[in-house]
Image (cartoon, grey):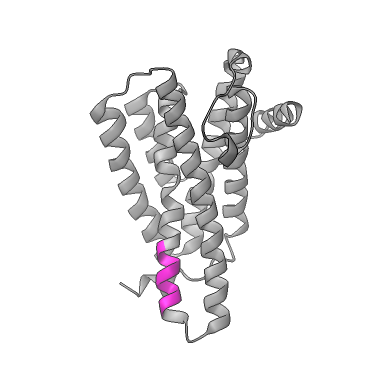
Amino acid sequence: MTENLRQEQDRTLASDRMRAGIPARVLFATMDRLYGREASLPKFRVLEVVARVPYFAWEHVGYVAITHTHQRPRLARDIHDEVKTVRAQQDNEFFHLLILEELLQRRDTPLSGFRDRVLPQVIAAVYYYVSWLLYVVRPRWSHELNAQFEDHAEHEYMRYVADHPELDEEPWVSEFRDDYGHHSTVGDLLRQIALDERHHKDASLARLDTARFGSAGGSAD
């Protein structure tokens, strides 16, 4: 597993980053201003607070769309299947957050109540409404934004591991191993998280022209 993950790290670092649109650039600049330009575990924790938000927004829109399309059972079923997919991605991001929180606690990393607890929730709330609005207007735009965010996360995680070889000497001990996977070191753990972000990016790119219930969901409220 270690060798495979190292190959995925090399693949990521050899690839170009996606060109970010204006919403993504604003988000990245805000996080850099508040948490520094350099990657760090506390900054990754904030990233994971924000990362699950688009999936939650899409799930909400999807369930509203089902309410309006249940008279067309086949379409409603297709929407429900897509909702299940984005819910699984949301749950994956949730475990990323739990794992990073646990890592920081085990390291006794000090966190600020306002900067590290309150501000991430504010950023996530704004990002939720941006993702929701884009999805209601045109689902493709919301998926593009998410793909740019996930691409950024993938590269940041892989670069961080490459810059900190000591992580490959640090065993990963966690109560979430049975839920997330058994990785021997923190280095491999972070590589796997980065790979998850790539999979989420690829899923959003694959849905650019297939997501089709934004306007149906938007009429529900």
Range drawn in magenta: 60-67
| Quadrant location, the C terminus | bottom left
Q: Is residue 211 above or below residue 164?
A: below
| Quadrant location, the N terminus | top right
* Res. 43 image quadrant: top left
Q: Is residue 56 above or below residue 214?
A: above
Judge whether residue 62 is colored magenta: yes
The image shows residue 147 at horizontal and vertical percentages of 54, 47
The image shows residue 102 at horizontal and vertical percentages of 44, 28
Q: Is residue 65 left or right of residue 155?
A: left
Q: Is residue 166 above or below residue 50?
A: above
Residue in the foreground of this view, choosing between 94 and 215: 94
* Res. 197 image quadrant: top right
| Residue located 59% across and 12% down the image | 166
In this rendering, the count of numbered labels is 0
Residue at the limit of the structure toward the left, as seen here: 114
Q: Is residue 201 visible?
A: yes
Judge whether residue 143 is colored magenta: no
Main secondary structure along the magenta-highlighted residues: helix
The image shows residue 167 at horizontal and vertical percentages of 58, 17
* Res. 101 image quadrant: top left
Residue in the foreground of this view, choosing between 4 and 16: 4
Q: Is residue 53 above or below residue 18?
A: below
| Residue located 56% across and 75% down the image | 77
Residue in the foreground of this view, choosing between 141 and 58: 58
The image shows residue 63 at horizontal and vertical percentages of 43, 69
Q: Is residue 150 left or right of residue 202?
A: left
